[in-house]
Amino acid sequence: MSLKGTPWFPFLYGLFHAYLISHAGNITRVRAVIHQKGDLNLNRIVETEFLSHAVVKMVIEAPDVAKKRKAGQFIVLMTDEKGERIPLTIVDSDSEKGTVTIIFQVVGKTTTCLSDMKEGESLYCVLGPLGRPTEIEKFGTTVCVGGGVGIGVVYPITKALKEAGNRVISIIGARTKDILILEDEMKAISDELLIATDDGSYGFHGFVSDVLQNLIDRGEKIDRVVTIGPVPMMRVVCNLTKHYNIKTIVSLNPIMVDATGMCGACRVSVGGKTKFACVDGPEFDGHEVDFDLLTSRLRMYYVQEKEALEYIRCECNE
């Protein structure tokens, strides 16, 4: 049934047109490439490595994405035709080999299915690169803070900041030493690497925010902070840096569906204004993010996510 000729049509058309006009800049920026399974040598899993019991590093063939991606951007992938679309940050790429690297934590149905896929198998669909690239320039002394699987997300940003001539101090943390990832990789691209574990099993006994406070207390002049990890961690870091008026960038991971700015599922509040993480982000000024709203939206489908994960576990055991 067509809406043309109904009283609602002019209103809906006008609303949609206004949306396109207001987001025209974002739409033109989403020049992503869709790789589908039927395409030759695309989406094939080249390498899979468990960095810890629940964190997986995966290298995927996606040559066009590899050529275009920049630090801070992400892909959306589907494991199969009926699977959900999930966004994952591009950790690294090799334009000559035509591959991109992702790191993800096995926490739900899709990441469980993804972790079970073998080298040589192909993903159904890969879309990217998406999102705004990280603002990279020579700021001076930058501190890159990564927590948990967020270390994988902060890695390409740290690398790009170092290549731009910044003095880079990296702080990485995890609950325990056993689940700390990318220590050697982060050390190779940092002028100084500091490590924290919640239980004190490695490095500083405490949180990454405590290590950052120690840097400030020792008189370190910090020009910019980039912090990526669990929402509570990013919030604490932002509260700390706000007190010292240090510009702080966060990368947000709200629920995302189409990743092109049309569905609105990934909306967040930044500076009192609604933003879409997929096209306006995923990086924002951390001092302006409404973390309360972000936290509540992340938990919207908590029950359904647990049910889906239990279902897939039952399937695997059959």
Image (cartoon, grey):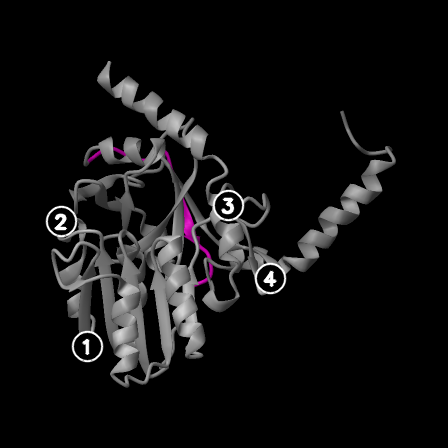
Q: Please name the residue shown 51% across and 42% down the image.
A: 258
Q: Is residue 308 visible?
A: yes
State the CA–CA distance, disc 3 to disc 1: 37 Å
| Label located before the other in sequence (2 or 4) | 4
Q: Nearer the viewer, residue 63 or 316?
A: 316
Q: Nearer the viewer, residue 177 or 106?
A: 177
Q: Which residues are magenta?
A: 120-133
Instruction: Kindly identify which numbered label has been placed on residue 296.
Output: 3
Q: Are marks 2 and 1 in contact (CB under 8 Å)?
A: no
State the CA–CA distance, disc 2 to disc 4: 44 Å
Residue that label 1 marks: 191
Kind of residue at disc 1? Asp
The mark lying in front, picked from 3 and 1, is 3
**Quadrant location of the C terminus?**
top left
Kind of residue at disc 3? Ser
Q: Are marks 1 and 4 in contact (CB under 8 Å)?
A: no
Instruction: Kindly identify which numbered label has been placed on residue 25.
Output: 4
| Label 2: which secondary element | helix
